[in-house]
Amino acid sequence: MSSAQEQDRRGLLIILSSPSGAGKSTLATRLRQWDTDLSFSVSATTRPMRDGEADGVDYHFMAEKAFKDHVADDQMLEHAHVFGNFYGSPRAPVEAAINAGRDVLFDIDWQGAQQITNSALGAHTLSIFLLPPSIAELRTRLEKRNLDSPDVIARRMEKSWDEISHWGGYDYVLVNDDLDQTEAQLKTIIEATRLRRLQQPWLNDHVRGLQSEFEETS
């Protein structure tokens, strides 16, 4: 693809979803290392900041009232209430990125994925769901992370089937049994979807040029 065509490419909203512990955050990091132009949608949240986190980098930390005001003003592309806190994706930076031809990566749950897919930007989404190889392995991964208390892990496990039950609403579904293999599959899917006709508006002018050329020579 020529540089002019690359500049005229429409960006994708790439959605990764999975139950907690299935590997989406690790794979999202790997994808951003693979393509440094891939933007990450920094979510807004009302949950407290954890040690080591930075505002505007890990999340946009907001007071609950400010968050709800953004939702009321249609400034959130999607939002959800999870484990007592609100999470959402600010609309403006996402629209600016895809209009400039940059893909945006979302690490969100099925509720957010559904809202984005049903939004005005839905035609430009690519949604991928990651399944664990087993429920036992999912619990093991959560325990090894050492991020949550046993009570929170239990709540995440209870929620896991609710997440998994929505796998049928995604464009692609991968079983994350091997990180390297899943990463390779994700790259293949993204590269193919970038070539989708809808993502390449420059094709309209190209076909019109072919038509003019054909009419001049006929």
Image (cartoon, rainbow, N blue to C red):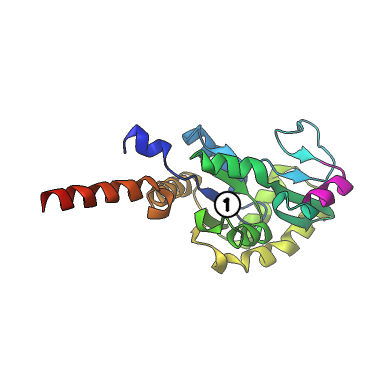
Instruction: Assign the N terminus to one quadrant of the image.
Output: top left
Work out whether 127 lies above or below 194. Answer: below
Query: On the picture, is 214 further left or further right than 116?
Result: left
Q: Residue at x 37, y 49 (%)?
A: 195
Q: Identify the image quadrant of residue 114.
A: bottom right
Instruction: Give the left or right position of residue 182, taking residue 78 as reference.
Output: left
Stretch of the chain drawn in magenta: 62-70
Left or right, residue 132 beside residue 171:
right
Secondary element under disc 1, as helix, strand or loop, is strand
In percent of width and height, residue 193 lies at: 42, 52
Above or below residue 45? Residue 129 is below
Q: Amino acid at mark 1?
A: Leu
Where residue 2 sits in the image (x, y, percent)?
A: 31, 35
Viewer-proximal residue, 105 or 74?
A: 74
Give residue 84's position: percent from left, percent from top.
Answer: 85, 55
Relative horizontal placement of residue 45, taking residue 1 as reference (left or right): right
Going by the picture, which residue comes out furthest to the left?
A: 218
Residue 190 drawn at (x, y percent) = 44, 48
Residue for badge 1 = 16
**Residue that appears at 73% across and 55% down:** 79
Between residues 132 and 95, which one lies in front from this camera angle?
A: 95
